[in-house]
């Protein structure tokens, strides 16, 4: 069944639904719609990232939701499902995992055949810099024979951990954490990620990556440390590096520099710098096996 609304109606419906993405995804801003010959581009910025991202939305050919596959009765209902699906994808790491290409100044994201953020059997997340709150627990302030109600003590507020305590579990696993602790004390830490085996215990820890800010404006990030333990697949190192680069870009880095030379960096767009080491312009950053293409 063909749709009963025009492309212009589809465009206006998507524009009307854009505020819903902003409400559901507070790290995205400046949302807009750009019309192309065969589809729409939903464009947006993310946090302090200097890039403008875009997601292609095909004009509807049948009155069905591109998100759920269920029938829809209007252009607005179709557009609402388009934006709901986009919001969910953005909240679950679309920018990090997507293949991408640069077109007309936009970084166009393609979630098809997307990059695995975490290699199978492993998990990557940020090294926590604050103390975890206490568990909720019952407080019995009455005689034990009178159990008519239970009161609850709220958890403690999270607090910043002393630099000397952060990453103690990584140190216990035999990794050197002196550099990131020093960067925390100097207020220059940009990103510290850890990798561990994906099991019920979240152990053992198998690697970490550290990046710092080179300048006070926080526009140049330095990849300081890349480490995985012997026997850990190189894909874990690649995932750690890719995630770190993505995070510093989202925090406003215009360039990323490093003295480290590992093969995964070239796949991300790093190139030799005139003064030595490697450098990356954030507009060139791209996941492995998905080269940046103009067109």
Image (cartoon, helix red, strand yellow):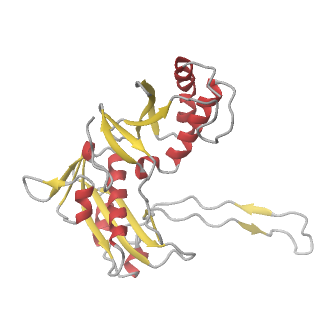
What is the total number of numbered labels drawn onto the structure image?
Answer: 0
Does residue 19 show up? yes
Of residue 4 and residue 125, the one placed in the foreground of this image is: 4
Q: Position of residue 169 (x, y in %)?
A: 43, 76
Q: Is residue 19 left or right of residue 115?
A: right
Please state the horizontal and vertical placement of residue 43, each as a whole percent of the image: 42, 32
Q: Position of residue 215 (x, y in %)?
A: 22, 48
Q: Where, by quadrant of the figure, is residue 282 drawn?
A: top left
Residue at point 35%, 45% (across, down):
100
- Farthest left residue in view: 274
For residue 177, above or below residue 86: below
Image quadrant occupied by the N terminus: top right
Task: Give above or below for 41 relative to 203.
Answer: above
- Residue shown at 31%/63% (left/top)? 210
Residue 216 in the image, given as x and y percentages of width and height: 24, 46
Residue closer to the observer: 24 or 150: 24
Q: Residue at x 17, y 62 (%)?
A: 259
| Residue at (52, 20) in percent of width and height | 7
Q: Does any portion of residue 219 appear in the rendered image?
A: no
Q: Identify the image quadrant of the C terminus.
A: top left
Q: Is residue 71 above or below residue 141?
A: above
């Amino acid at each position: 069944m063909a749709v009963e609304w025009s492309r212009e109606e589809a465009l206006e419906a998507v524009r009307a639904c854009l505020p819903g993405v902003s409400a559901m995804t507070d790290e995205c801003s400046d949302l807009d719609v750009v019309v192309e010959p065969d589809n729409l581009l939903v464009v947006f910025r993310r946090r302090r990232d200097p890039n403008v991202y875009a997601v292609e939305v095909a004009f509807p050919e049948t009155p069905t939701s591109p998100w759920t596959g269920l029938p829809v009765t209007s252009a607005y209902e179709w557009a609402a499902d388009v934006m709901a699906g986009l919001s969910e994808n953005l909240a679950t790491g679309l920018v990090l995992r997507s293949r991408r290409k640069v077109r007309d100044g936009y970084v166009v994201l393609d979630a098809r055949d997307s990059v695995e953020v975490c290699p199978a059997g492993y998990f990557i997340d940020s090294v926590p810099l604050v103390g975890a709150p206490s568990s909720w627990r019952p407080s019995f302030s009455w005689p034990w024979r009178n159990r008519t109600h239970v009161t609850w003590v709220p958890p403690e507020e999270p607090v910043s951990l002393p630099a000397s305590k952060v990453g103690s579990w990584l140190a216990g696993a035999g990794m050197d954490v002196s550099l990131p602790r020093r960067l925390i004390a100097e207020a220059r830490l940009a990103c510290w990620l850890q990798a561990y085996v994906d099991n019920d215990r979240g152990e053992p820890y198998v690697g970490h990556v550290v990046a710092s800010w080179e300048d006070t404006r926080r526009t140049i990030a330095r990849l300081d440390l890349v480490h995985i333990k012997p026997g850990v697949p190189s894909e874990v190192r690649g995932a750690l590096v890719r995630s770190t680069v993505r995070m510093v870009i989202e925090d406003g880095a215009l360039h990323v520099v490093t003295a480290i030379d590992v093969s995964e960096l070239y796949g991300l767009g790093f190139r030799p710098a005139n003064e030595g080491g490697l450098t990356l312009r954030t507009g060139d950053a791209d996941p492995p096996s998905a080269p940046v293409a103009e067109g």
